[in-house]
Image: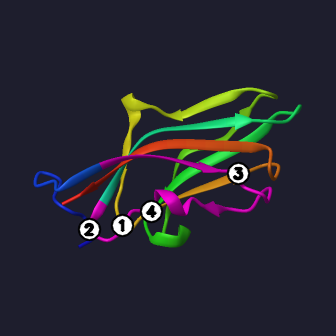
C-alpha cells in the first residue's frame, strides 16, 4: 500500500527525530522520516541549527523513491545558515506528507555542523 487512505485512521503517533549529517557535501537519507508500510508521515516542522562559528549551506529534498532514490524535489536548496543560528525549513503552515515510497534527503556543506530536528505524525490506516 503505497499511499494509505488517511480518512480511516487507526492511529496517529506524534514523534520527534534528529539528524546530524557527519559528511559534508554528501546526501544523507533521513531514514526516521520514511514511514513504515501502511503509514504516512505528516512532517510538521524541520529546523536546521548551525552549531559552528561559520555559515553552512543546507539542502533538504523530498525524493520520489525510498533510500534517497528517484527524483529529488528540493524543499530548501543550498540555503546558508548563519553561524550559531537556526533556520526553519518546514513549519505547520508548510507541512508535507511523506509516503512509504518516498524519502527525505539532507545535504550540508560541512559535516557535523548542522543539527536537524523534525516533529512529525505517523498516521496509520
Magenta stretch: residue 29 in it?
A: yes
Give the Cα distance between marks 4 and 1: 6 Å
Q: Are marks 4 and 2 in contact (CB under 8 Å)?
A: no
Look at 17% across and 56% down and name the residue there. 10
Residue 20 x, y percent position in the rendering: 70, 51
CB under 8 Å between discs 4 and 1? yes
In the image, which disc is placed on residue 38?
Answer: 2
- Residue highlighted by disc 3: 20
Closest to the observer, 93 or 84: 84
For marks 1 and 3, the one nearer the N-term is: 3
Q: CA distance from mark 3 to mark 4?
A: 16 Å
The region drawn magenta spans: 13-39
Q: Is residue 45 above or below residue 106?
A: above
For label 2, the SS is: loop
How many residues crowd around disc 3 within 10 Å: few (fewer than 14), some, or many (20 or more)? some
Can residue 1 be found in the magenta stretch? Answer: no
Alpha carbons under labels 1 and 3: distance apart: 22 Å
Amino acid at each position: 500500500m503505497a499511499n494509505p487512505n488517511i480518512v480511516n485512521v487507526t492511529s496517529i503517533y506524534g514523534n520527534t527525530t534528529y539528524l546530524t549529517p557527519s559528511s559534508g557535501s554528501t546526501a544523507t537519507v533521513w531514514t526516521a522520516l520514511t514511514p513504515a508500510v501502511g503509514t504516512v508521515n505528516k512532517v510538521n516542522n524541520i529546523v536546521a541549527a548551525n552549531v559552528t562559528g561559520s555559515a553552512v549551506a543546507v539542502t533538504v529534498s523530498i525524493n520520489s523513491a525510498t533510500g534517497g532514490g528517484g527524483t529529488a524535489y528540493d524543499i530548501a536548496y543550498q540555503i546558508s545558515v548563519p553561524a550559531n543560528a537556526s533556520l526553519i525549513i518546514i513549519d505547520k503552515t508548510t507541512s508535507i506528507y511523506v509516503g512509504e515510497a518516498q524519502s527525505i534527503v539532507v545535504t550540508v556543506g560541512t559535516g557535523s555542523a548542522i543539527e536537524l530536528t523534525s516533529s512529525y505524525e505517523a498516521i496509520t490506516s
